[in-house]
Image (cartoon, rainbow, N blue to C red):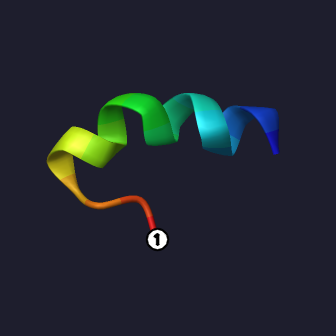
Amino acid sequence: MNIYLKWCSWAKMFIQCL
């Protein structure tokens, strides 16, 4: 899940990474 964690990086700001 590398991609997930990577996108979760900035996504966290936009939408809390679930």
The quadrant where residue 10 appears: top left
Q: Is residue 6 above or below residue 12?
A: above
In this figure, what is the number of numbered marks?
Answer: 1
**x, y (%) of residue 11?**
33, 42
**x, y (%) of residue 5?**
63, 39
Q: Quadrant of the N terminus?
A: top right
**x, y (%) of residue 6?**
59, 28
The residue shown at (17%, 46%) is 14
| Residue annotated with mark 1 | 18
- Side (left or right) of 14 relative to 3: left
The quadrant where residue 17 appears: bottom left
Classify mark 1: helix, strand or loop: loop
For the residue marked with disc 1, what is the amino acid?
Leu
The quadrant where residue 3 appears: top right
The residue shown at (31%, 46%) is 12
**x, y (%) of residue 13?**
20, 41
